[in-house]
Image: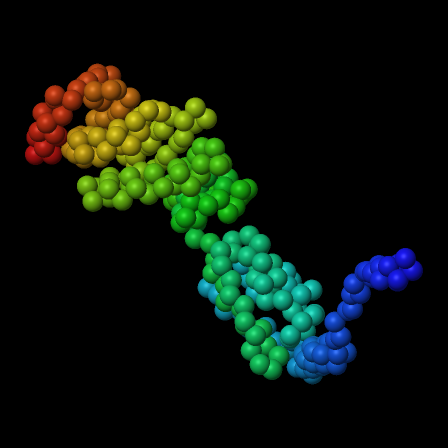
């Protein structure tokens, strides 16, 4: 019996886990290398950095002066030749009224070169705003607006759309001797145009693109021959348009009469 007890197996011991051995040098060496590179970079920056001694500004100045630009970027310039942020300088310049674009670069050893493009006003927006050639409102309050610019108006959020329609219509009217003086979009989405001759063109809210094409294809020819006699043109019809004459008479023209209207316009020019 004693032998049987002796033969009993000993209880199994739980396995022991040992952590993998990592050489400290494998961790420390890369960290030291990174630290050395970073320290070298910082020392190099301090050695290269110096006070900015001159600012070169090139631009066809009309609305903005070099002094305005220097004042706007003065704080950033104090950061030094390397420390100054070119992106920040650019943002500060573009934030100035009448500035459209700006390019900023470093010129070794201590000069900053700035090239500036001013905004080009293409139209008056509302009572006192100005739009650039992209239809963007860049001046919202101007004491005196240029009288020679066309006048566009509508919701501020749709200024680019109004400008695009103006440019599109004008491009097609100029070859036939007409021009646009005013484009208005009201809060309800209704469009109106006024030509240089004073003729009012009512486009309304619906099918504006189709009505504009009809005006350009047919009515513009009529106006070219009889502009002095016409007061307005109403395009707000599903099948044609109406011409209002300064004499007080009206001439409705439907779809079937468009060719006759074109022939009438041709006779009017003879």
Indicate the position of residue 245 as horizontal and vertical percent values: 23, 21
Q: Is residue 99 visible?
A: yes
Q: Quadrant of the N terminus?
A: bottom right
Residue 119's place in the image compared with 212, above or below, is below
Residue 105's place in the image compared with 212, above or below, is below
Residue visible at 31% across and 29% down in the picture = 208
- Side of 105 where 50 appears, left or right: right
Residue visible at 19% across and 18% down in the picture = 252
Return the residue found at the far front: 1
Indicate the position of residue 58 as horizontal and vertical percent values: 50, 69
Residue 263's place in the image compared with 248, above or below, is below
User: In which quarter of the view is residue 77 placed?
Assistant: bottom right
Return the residue found at the far right: 2
Residue visible at 9% across and 25% down in the picture = 260
Q: Is residue 200 visible?
A: no
Nearest the viewer among 123 and 158 is 158
């Amino acid at each position: 019996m004693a032998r049987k007890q002796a033969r009993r197996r000993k209880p199994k011991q739980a396995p022991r886990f040992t952590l993998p051995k990592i050489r400290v040098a494998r961790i420390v060496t890369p960290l030291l290398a990174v630290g050395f590179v970073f320290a070298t970079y910082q020392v190099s920056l301090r050695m290269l950095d110096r006070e900015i001694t001159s600012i070169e500004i090139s631009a066809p100045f009309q609305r903005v002066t070099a002094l305005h630009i220097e004042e706007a970027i003065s704080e950033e310039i104090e950061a030094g030749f390397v420390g100054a942020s070119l992106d920040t300088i650019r943002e500060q310049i573009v934030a100035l009224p009448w500035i459209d674009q700006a390019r900023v670069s470093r010129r070794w050893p201590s000069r900053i070169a700035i090239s500036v493009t001013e905004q080009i006003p293409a139209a008056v927006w509302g009572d006192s705003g100005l739009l650039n050639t992209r239809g963007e409102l860049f001046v919202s309050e101007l004491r005196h607006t240029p009288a020679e610019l066309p006048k566009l108006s509508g919701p501020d959020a749709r200024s680019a759309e109004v400008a695009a329609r103006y440019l599109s219509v004008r491009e097609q009217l100029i070859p036939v001797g007409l021009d646009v003086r005013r484009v208005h979009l009201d809060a309800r989405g209704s469009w109106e145009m006024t030509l240089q001759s004073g003729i009012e063109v009512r486009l309304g809210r619906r099918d504006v693109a189709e009505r504009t094409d009809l005006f350009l294809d047919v009515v513009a020819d009529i106006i070219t021959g009889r502009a002095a006699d016409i007061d307005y043109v109403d395009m707000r019809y599903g099948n044609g348009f109406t011409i209002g004459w300064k004499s007080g008479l009206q001439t409705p023209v439907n779809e079937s009469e468009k060719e006759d209207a074109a022939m009438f316009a041709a006779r009017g020019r003879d």
